[in-house]
Amino acid sequence: MRLVFADMDDTFLTHDKRVGEGNLKAIERMAEAGVEFVPCSGRPVSGIPREALETPATHYAVSSNGAAVNRLGADGEVEVLRRRLMAADDVLAIYDALRGHHVTFDVFVDGTAYAERWRYEHLDEYIADPATVGAYKRMRTLIDEDVPALLAGGEGVEKVTLFWTDEADRDLTLSLIDANPRLTWASSVSNNIEFSDVDATKGSGLVWLAGHLGVPVADTVSFGDNLNDVSMLKAAGTGVAMGNATPEAKAAADEVTLDCDHDGVGAWVMCELDREAAEA
């Protein structure tokens, strides 16, 4: 075990968005053993919790579902090593088709998640859990212009996150994404869709970073709980699903650990480090 990739929400973080003491202790021991801890999140890099970024074992982070692989500087600076972006025109074609529909449309550009103010003000209608809606709100940078104005300079987009309340809007959105071979989609909660460049997945980010660091993929471990984690659970040498994971995530994993509220990541890592120490 040389590289450990962990999703954040409902994986490394508890359901109420805290980092458990067991996970922090496991990271300290990983640092002592020379094992890298890599946050691998659907969040923009600016939204990954400091407790996950500022650890002695953390020097890299995969953000926006794999659209960006970042190196973290000691001074808080972020260097993007790999980026896979959607063309603005592909994003705006879906934005225009969804005008007048009751969906959100948050765009991730250069490590920041932007939300149109009027959509942001309705976010509570899509997300019932206070901890989850609070986390989403904290990660959003509000814009008073619309998305076409934001992207008028032709900026590439890391990811778009939509929430929906009407299944017809979900089906329309998925049909638009599936019709474009340059795009792929995933989901992190039951009523959201996250779409990005076809090569921007957590799994592709994991494989790229392992190669960049000269680490065999067989020596990587990944932890996840939802559909947007399936690609990295399959890609890693060992994929570990959380006890609270969706059936799809568990089916993609090699093993299942405790749930996120019982520090499942830390518990599994500690057992693996103990096993490796005993065999040394």
Image (tube, rainbow, N blue to C red):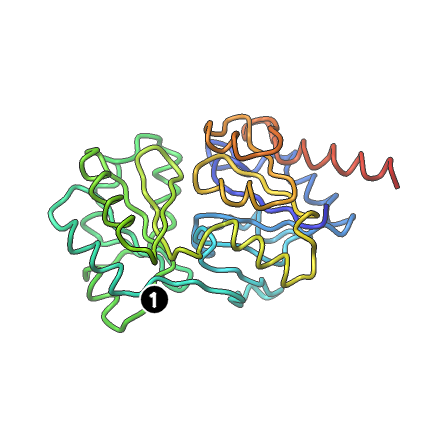
Q: Is residue 231 left or right of residue 90?
A: right
> At which x and y percent is residue 182?
34, 58
Instruction: Identify the residue at image location x=60%, y=65%.
Output: 73
Q: Please state, as top left, top right, bottom left or bottom right, where the N terminus lies in the image.
A: top right
Q: Please state, as top left, top right, bottom left or bottom right, where the C terminus lies in the image.
A: top right
Instruction: Identify the residue at image location x=52%, y=54%.
Output: 204
Under mark 1, the amino acid is Gly
Q: Considering depth in this image, is 114 or 195 the residue closer to the camera? A: 195
Instruction: Identify the residue at image location x=68%, y=47%.
Output: 218
> At which x and y percent is residue 16?
46, 32
Query: Is residue 75 depicted above or below 67 in this figure?
Result: below
Residue pointed to by mark 1 = 156
> At which x and y percent is residue 231?
50, 44
Place residue 61 in its image quadrant.
bottom right
Instruction: Identify the residue at image location x=23%, y=49%.
Output: 176
Query: Is residue 32 depicted above or below 250 in this figure?
Result: below
